[in-house]
Image (spheres, rainbow, N blue to C red):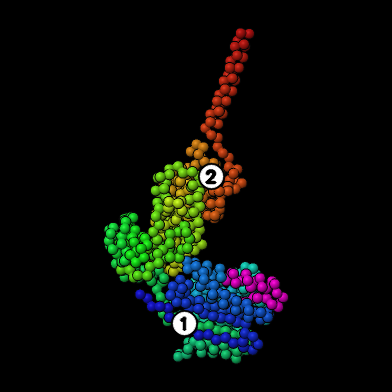
Amino acid sequence: MSDPLRIDYGQYSSAGRKAINQDAHGLRLPSGSLLQDKGLALALADGISSSAVGHVASAVAVQGFLADYYSTPPSWSVRLSVQRVVAANNAWLFGQSRQGPRDHGHVCTFSALVLKSTTAHLFHVGDARIYRLSGGTLEQLSEDHRLHTTSEHSYLSRALGVARHVEIDYRRLPLQVGDLFLLATDGVHEHLSRSQIQSIIERPGQDLDTAARELVETALAQGSQDNLTVQLLRLYALPLPTAGELFEQLAELPPAPLLEPGQRFDGFRISTVLHSGSRSHVYQAEDLASGRQVVIKAPSAELASDRQALARLLNEEWVARRLDNPHLLGAVSHERPRSHLYTLASFVPGRTLRQWLRDNPQPPLDSVIAIVEQIARGLQALHRLEILHQDLRPENILIDDSGFVRIIDFGAVHIAAHAENASVPSTSHLPLGSAAYAATEYFLGEGGSELSDQFSLGVITYEMLSGQLPYGTRLAATRSPAQQARLAYRSLLEDEGAFPAWLDAVIRQAVHPRPQRRHEALSSFIHQLRHPGAATLRVREPASLAQRLRFWRRLALLLGTAVLALTLCLIRLATN
């Protein structure tokens, strides 16, 4: 197991020679899962001196950030979480600025540092600064957003509250034990040289609060006329990366043995073996304490030492615990310690979409669309959490007796929040499940996107209607854009009169080999299945077999008549 995050923190802020301190600063160090999911955050803002409400703007920026950042979904990446929160704060500040007089602009700089696992995430707009002292070198990590018009005059080129949208600088870098971060407003850094700053913060035996105060007082003594604020943070111990911690926990547990119906295991009674394969063993079981039915999934003995396989197993439970959507199978709250390596999920009775298709080989179009819509709702819930499914296929979709649909397998998901940690074991872009449903970009070694899940859903839709695959088995053999460009889509219209041309056009776009040619969003694909657009409706319906037969019969009759007339003319000429 790794050491917990251990830091030392110091701060000091002063109005200086001004009547009001328009700077704001803060730090939040949560505990438990919130620290693991979101990390530590500190922020600094400086309200513009020309505004009577600059202190309000800076307080909103810092307090709003430290409160709202920790309310974002755990699966959101640090970058997305901070950008969404800062964008919302900026919109509020801009709205207040537009409503008030010119000397009441809600404008401020904003700089934030988020330390999650072993990575630092920096966010910055304005002219405060973020420094790092590491290995005896003091480095400025942020860029001043200040435009100098003359040697004596300048103005902020970027700040919160100035415009409806704000561009936020972002940078990430690995952390090391011993790193010391410094955040300072311009009232401090404009009046201290880099060597002075380093000399003060490196002074032996000095606590960080004292160092912060000395930086402020030195800048004030050297002529600073502005508010002055300093934050200092030193790292004494770092945890392992989030995924690394989970791997370590799993490595301490032996793989679950093969289980049989009736057997008791970790407080469960095994009811049924649902699946047993080369990658995993899945069981339905009863929780003897609560009486509820659960699903136990354990890796096969061959994969128990495979770090990537364990990462995929972790993904399943990590995702399921954070889901709150009826079309996604959720996890089971379980407090008992585990003696072996396995995951738990809710048990929902039903049949897979593959089984449903065997029972309904020619389903009505309305039934197909109803199922596809429910699958899409589950995918959209994942996408909102920055999670890609990457293995959507009929075997991973469950339909209960009422027709309610759930996605039930998350073993191949891509989680943006986990991908931020460089130490998470990398996985191949090639699909882990059935290649028949995988998007074309995976076969080119490229990463997936929400459009990749749209492709898989499009293939499923096509198969539900036709019983076939849009590109047959040729897709899995493609490894270059040129090969994929030669893929021949089999039109649904080849099934004589079975489907309207607009439906074929909607599905064909969803499964286009080039991601940029697909529907711009999953919602657009689903909407057009119910409400085809004008462009789709203009797709010309091909002639039916009966229409083609009538055409050729009429053409043959006309040709016959012409031949007969020509023959009669020739006979008359001959007799004359």
Q: Is residue 356 magenta?
A: no
The quarter of the image holding the C terminus is: top right
In front: 262, or 370? 262
Position of 291 relative to 222 (above/below): above
Q: Nearer the viewer, mark 2 or mark 1?
A: 2
| Mark 2: amino acid | Leu
Secondary structure at numbered mark 1: strand
Position of 8 relative to 428 (above/below): below
Q: Quadrant of residue 445?
A: bottom left
User: Could you tell me residue 515's position as x and y percent?
Assistant: 51, 53
**Is 232 positioned to the left or the right of 304 in the image?**
right
Residue 32's label in the rendered image is none
Q: Residues within 10 Å of mark 1 (few under 14, many from 20)?
A: some
User: Could you tell me residue 380's position as x and y percent?
Assistant: 51, 58
Secondary structure at numbered mark 2: helix
**Is 185 positioned to the left or the right of 246 in the image?**
right
Q: CA distance from mark 2 to mark 1?
A: 60 Å
Question: Which segment did they paint magenta?
Answer: 86-109
Who's the residue at 45% across and 54% down the image? 405
User: Could you tell me residue 196's position as x and y percent?
Assistant: 53, 87
Which residue does the numbered mark 1 point to in the structure image? 234
| Mark 1: amino acid | Arg
Q: Is residue 108 magenta?
A: yes
Which residue does the numbered mark 2 point to in the structure image? 503
